[in-house]
Image: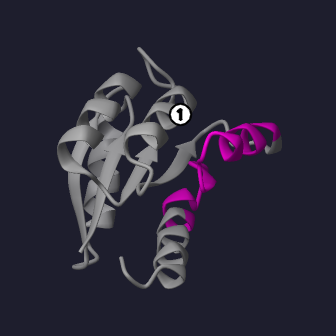
Amino acid sequence: MLKILIADDSDHVRRALRTCLELNPDWEVCGEACDGRAAIDAVRKSAPDLVLLDYAMPMMNGLEAAREIKGIAPQSTLFLFTMYASDPLKKIAEEVGVRAVISKDVGGVGALVKAIEEMISQCPTQ
């Protein structure tokens, strides 16, 4: 069972992602967070396999949270799911340990699901 934590400041986005991700019976959304600081706390409590981080969140953005999460849960894979996807952001994200930056644009959820499936295929122990 792949345990996924969703961190996004939009309730709507969190609910929609949970609904889509939990269509896969092998995936479980183990928690949600509305900002970067809450994401770090949730990682400590739930030890997710995958953390989906929005970039633009209050209290602490997704990159700052990713930096801290990598320190406390290096086994967790981090994805940035954001409206601000760009090559410069991807470069910075990679430097802090984010595996993929996925745009929330049209088709974003499909791209996210595909990225998760690719991650699992590369790490069959998940």
Q: Is residue 2 above or below residue 95?
A: below
Which region of the structure is painted magenta? 88-111
Looking at the figure, which quarter contains the N terminus? Answer: bottom left
Image position of 50 (left or right of 5): right
Using the image as rendered, state which of residue 71 and residue 54 is in the foreground: 71
Q: Tell whether position 92 is magenta.
A: yes
Disc 1 residue type (three-letter):
Arg
Q: Position of residue 125 (x, y in %)?
A: 37, 81
Using the image as rendered, state which of residue 108 and residue 36 is in the foreground: 36
Q: Residue at x 27, y 55 (%)?
A: 18
Q: How many tags in the picture?
A: 1
Q: Position of residue 98 (x, y in %)?
A: 59, 48
Q: Is residue 95 above or below residue 64?
A: below
Q: Position of residue 107 (x, y in %)?
A: 57, 62
Image quarter of residue 90: top right
Q: Position of residue 19 (x, y in %)?
A: 26, 60
Q: Residue at x 36, y 76 (%)?
A: 126
Using the image as rendered, state which of residue 102 and residue 15 is in the foreground: 102
Callout 1 crowding tier (Cα within 10 Å): few <14, some 14–19, many ≥20 = some
Q: Tell whether position 82 is magenta.
A: no
- Element at label 1: helix
Using the image as rendered, state which of residue 4 and residue 20 is in the foreground: 4
